[in-house]
Amino acid sequence: MSDSSLEEENILVPIDGSNASKHAFDYALNFPAVSITILTVINPFDIDPVASGLQSPSGRAGIPGYSQEWYEEVEEKIKSLHERKRERAADSDITIRSEIRYGSSAQQIVKYTQEQEIDHVILGRHSKDPLSRMLLGNVSESVVRRVPAVVTVVS
């Protein structure tokens, strides 16, 4: 019989580059024996409601069409953001994983939490910064109500 207190806790930290998500990530680094997944959700619907003539490279219905270069540029910025978070945690024994998803921020956070059996979600309060709205948005309330895990909202 194993002691559950010694098991590694799976923490999800949605990040978007805002100070609020930075504080949430820093807060998560204080937990012992954890595996942290940093998740960034790109919600193209929050970016530009009018993008005529462009096709979605994902080929998925419901995702607005932008140029391939647009998607690549956004993903590169996010990968760079995730790499900075890995570097921030380099001196610890914490395992850091990275995930990028497209769609509604709240829906993707809830879905990822269910799929990956996340124990704890730590997220920052919403930001009014346009980039933050694009990537994370004001989803705290929806996540708290719907996610099947402990949720901590960090200011």
Image (tube, helix red, strand yellow):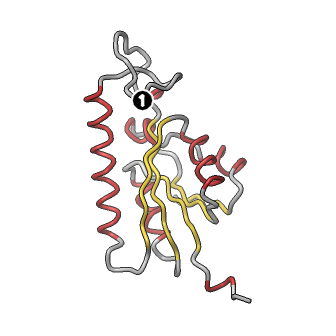
| Residue sitting at the far top | 53
Amino acid type of the residue that numbered disc 1 sits on in the rendered structure: Ser
Residue at image location 48% in from the left, 76% down from the top: 30
Q: Quadrant of the N terminus?
A: bottom right
Q: Nearer the viewer, residue 143 or 98?
A: 98
| Residue 135 image position (x, y, % from top left) | 44, 40
Q: Which residue is mark 1?
A: 58
| Residue 97 image position (x, y, % from top left) | 43, 62
- Place residue 96 in its image quadrant: bottom left
- Place residue 74 in its image quadrant: top left
**Viewed as shown, does residue 119 lie left or right of 12?**
right
Q: Nearer the viewer, residue 138 or 32?
A: 32
| Residue 91 image position (x, y, % from top left) | 32, 79
Mark 1: few/some/many CA within 10 Å (<14, 14-19, 20+):
few
Residue at image location 48% in from the left, 69% down from the top: 27
Residue at image location 34% in from the left, 10% down from the top: 53
Q: Secondary structure at mark 1?
A: loop
Q: Nearer the viewer, residue 22 or 68?
A: 68
**Viewed as shown, does residue 21 lie left or right of 77?**
right
Residue at image location 46% in from the left, 28% down from the top: 46
Q: Nearer the viewer, residue 73 or 139?
A: 73
Q: Is residue 41 above or below residue 90?
A: above
